[in-house]
Image (cartoon, grey):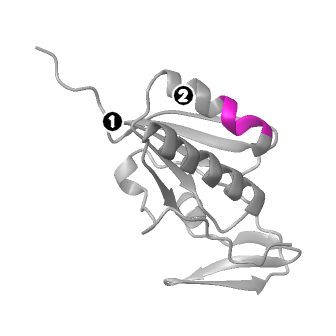
Amino acid sequence: MSGALPKRTLVINPISSPLQFALYEGNELKEQWEREGYASELLLPELERRLESGLDEILYVNGPGSQMGIKLTYIALETLHLLRGIPFGAVSAFALNDGRPLKAMGRLYFVKEKETIITQPLEETIAQEFSFPSTLDALEREPGNRPDYRLPAV
């Protein structure tokens, strides 16, 4: 008698360059990969490939960061949810970069101070490095799944 298959969760980071993806089975990180290019060109083919092997849930980085990448990812995931019933949620970009400042625009960075996110000018350039935790439990989810733009649309 075989047990149930472990839950498969895809995590997408549309604000990184290159785009980052991770696949968790159960609670464990099984695979991670990157794709060089634009979210508008890469996101749907990646989702299609992963949907073929089955997904139970999708999480995405909802910000703060690249508004275009966030917006495209949200629309694609909302569409999948409506058409196929695949639930999706969100995680903050700060959850994948150990809480370091995130590039906003120009010399402005998003800085997390306790539970508040502010924009602050910084003189030094801060590398935008992201990594996926080894377990899904270590990834704190946001209360909703809507984009967190923080800056007005340009």
Cα distance in 3D space between marks 1 and 2: 14 Å
Judge left or right: residue 43 versus residue 80: right
Residue 66 in view here? no
x and y percentages locating residue 90 in the rendered image:
50, 59
x and y percentages locating residue 124 in the rendered image:
83, 75
Residue ID for mark 2 = 50
Q: Residue furthest left?
A: 1
Residue 44 lies within the magenta run: yes
Q: How many marks?
A: 2
- Check disc 1 and give the amino acid type: Lys
Cβ–Cβ under 8 Å for marks 1 and 2: no
x and y percentages locating residue 30 in the rendered image:
44, 31
Q: Which residues, given as a range, are shown in magenta?
A: 41-45
29 and 9: which is toward the camera:
9
- Check disc 2 and give the amino acid type: Arg
x and y percentages locating residue 86 in the rendered image:
44, 41
Q: Residues within 10 Å of mark 1 (few under 14, many from 20)?
A: some
Mark found first going from the N terminus, 1 or 2: 1
Give the SS element for disc 1: loop
